[in-house]
Amino acid sequence: MSEPARQRQALVVRGGWDGHHPVEATELFIPFLRENGFDVRIEESPAVYADAEVMAATDLIVQCNTMNSIEKDELLGLRAAIEAGTGMAGWHGGIADSYRNSSDYLQLIGGQFATHPGRHPDERPGNEEDNYLPYTVEITDLGRTHEITAGIDDFELNTEQYWVLHDDLIDVLATTTHPTQPYHPWHRPITSPAVWTRLWGKGRIFVATPGHSVDVLEDPNVRTIIERGMLWASR
């Protein structure tokens, strides 16, 4: 008799800045993971990345950990696991603004939050909505055929629009363009990746920049992209 198939293992690593609601945001996707056959382990810090045995058995990391720090042994463990085939997925600052103390983490992910341009100074209420802007997520030619974004048309959001510093090793499935405004210092529109994938060794990495708050994650387009992205990234 053949042995039963091993259940896939998902590791949810959450924490950091409370403004991104790491518990509520990840709880939104945990039922989906379980429905798709994952056993889910939850950790509140990246310390688990230094556990080589756990990482070797992990098929998918879902990270929601903003503006935190990572220790050298944790980062080495994370990189080694992904190179060996563990997948990684995340959204917004939970993956693209996670460990500002590590340039090696930035290289791993391939894109880093730089800023989110704000409203006109006269239209800022003095809270997080200062940086809420209407913008378009535009699916690229690659995105129109990729399994993560196929069948999804360009869509509108009103939330933080990430300006991302990135390299050419990412495969961009969607972009967003920051227009010029008289109250901003740049002089031509800037296009940033909004959804991308990255191959790293034997592993796959998926990033979506929308996701500042739970209501954005519940947008049907955003949620579909993230759910598909997690499945794509998994070993």
Image (cartoon, grey):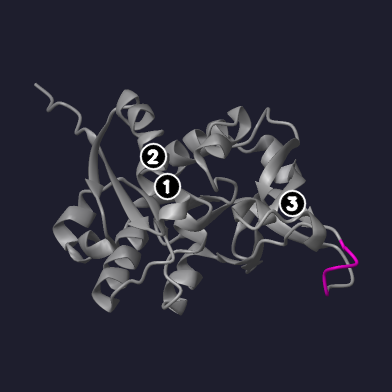
Q: Secondary structure at mark 3?
A: strand
Dot 1 crowding, Cα within 10 Å, few <14, some 14–19, many 20+: many
Say above or below: 133 vs 71.
above
Work out how far the residue at label 2 is from the one at label 1, CA to CA, in angstroms: 5 Å
Span colored in magenta: 180-185
190 left or right of 31? right
User: Which quarter of the rendering shows the C terminus?
Assistant: top left
Residue holding disc 2: 24
Residue, disc 1: 21
Q: Residues within 10 Å of mark 3 (few under 14, many from 20)?
A: many
Task: Say which amino acid is labelled 3.
Answer: Thr
Magenta segment, prevailing SS (helix, strand or loop): loop
Q: What is the three-letter code of the residue carrying label 2?
A: Glu
Looking at the image, is mark 1 or mark 3 earlier in the sequence? 1
- The residue at which mark 3 appears reads as 176
Residue 218: image quadrant is top right
Instruction: Count numbered badges in the picture.
Output: 3
Q: Is residue 17 above or below residue 23?
A: below
Q: Residue 139: in sight, yes or no?
A: no
Q: Residue at x 28, y 62 (%)?
A: 46
Cα distance between the residues tagged 2 and 3: 26 Å
| Disc 1 from disc 3: Cα separation | 24 Å
The spot of residue 59 in percent (x, y) is 30, 45
Secondary structure under the numbered disc 1 in the rendered image: loop
Which type of secondary structure does the marked residue at label 2 adopt? helix
Quadrant where the N terminus is found in the figure? top left
* In the foreground, 21 or 123: 123
Residue at 46 percent across and 57 percent down: it is 95
* Left or right of 179, for residue 157: left
Q: Could you tell me residue 67's position as x and y percent?
A: 44, 66
